[in-house]
Image (tube, rainbow, N blue to C red):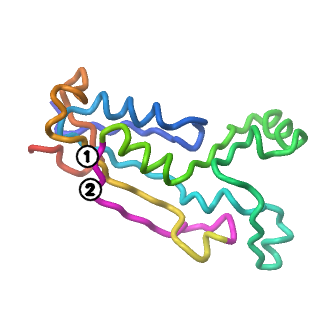
């Protein structure tokens, strides 16, 4: 039996993440912990035209939630699909952190970090990686019990109660 399990999930490719948070909460045993990571939503707002980056300009263009399906031009979307690229979705903090809280998690910790290899101009000015630590409540009354009975948590961190 392992003290912890780690299941990587990328919500960057999920249009609606609230069901993801509900399912994470459902499979965690009481006291289990979810460490998620995602981009600061500000990353999705700026125009990605290289001319703006060359000029040092951050030009807001997109509203949140961001969606390649709705925000790219038909030609850009077709080129992305023809190239076999995954479609990207950018979520607000309300969808990310608020969605975890709505699912039943508690906010226990928070970490943010800068992009080690900035792709966008905004990456040079503020942390764009976010990691909330959200444990399930120890008194969920059976909710959050995974089939294996193991707590899903971040690798290298002890499972709750160990």
Residue 118 image offset from top left, x and y in percent: 62, 68
Which residue occupies the extreme left position in the image?
162
Dominant SS in magenta:
loop
Q: Quadrant of the C terminus?
A: top left
Residue at left 43%, top 43%? 99
**Taking 60 as reference, is 10 left or right?**
left
Q: Which mark is residue 135?
A: 1
Residue 133 image offset from top left, x and y in percent: 32, 53
Mark 2 highlights which residue?
108
Residue at left 22%, top 51%? 157
Hey, which quadrant is residue 27 in on the image? top left
Residue 55 shown in magenta? no
| Crowding at mark 2 (Cα within 10 Å: few <14, some 14-19, many 20+) | few
Magenta extent: 105-121
Mark 2 or mark 1: whose residue is earlier in sequence: 2
| Crowding at mark 1 (Cα within 10 Å: few <14, some 14-19, many 20+) | many
In the rendered view, tell whether residue 85 sits above or below residue 107.
above
Which residue occupies the extreme top position in the image?
147
Give the Cα distance between marks 2 and 1: 7 Å
Of helix, strand and loop, which one carries label 1? strand
- Pointers 2 and 1 in contact (CB under 8 A)? yes
In the rendered view, tell whether residue 139 sits above or below residue 37.
above
Residue 43 image offset from top left, x and y in percent: 63, 61
Q: Which mark is residue 99?
A: none
Q: Nearer the viewer, residue 1 or 18?
A: 18
Residue at left 36%, top 34%? 24
Q: Quadrant of the N terminus?
A: top left
Residue 55 image offset from top left, x and y in percent: 82, 79
Q: Nearer the viewer, residue 79 or 122?
A: 122
Q: Nearer the viewer, residue 66 or 160?
A: 66
Residue 106 shown in magenta? yes
């Amino acid at each position: 039996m392992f003290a912890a399990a780690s299941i990587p999930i990328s919500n960057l490719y999920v249009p609606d993440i609230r069901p993801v948070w509900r399912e994470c909460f459902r499979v965690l045993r009481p006291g289990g912990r979810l460490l998620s990571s995602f981009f600061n939503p500000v990353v999705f707002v700026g125009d990605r035209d290289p001319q703006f980056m060359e000029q040092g300009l951050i030009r807001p263009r997109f509203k949140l939630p961001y969606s390649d399906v709705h925000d790219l031009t038909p030609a850009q979307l077709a080129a992305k699909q023809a190239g076999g690229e995954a479609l990207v979705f950018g979520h607000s903090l309300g969808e990310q952190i608020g969605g975890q809280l709505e699912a039943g998690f508690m906010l226990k910790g928070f970490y943010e970090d800068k992009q080690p290899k900035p792709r966008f101009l905004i990456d040079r000015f503020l942390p764009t990686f976010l990691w909330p630590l959200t444990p399930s409540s120890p008194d969920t009354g059976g909710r959050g019990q995974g089939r294996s009975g193991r707590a899903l948590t971040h690798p290298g961190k002890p499972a709750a109660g160990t």
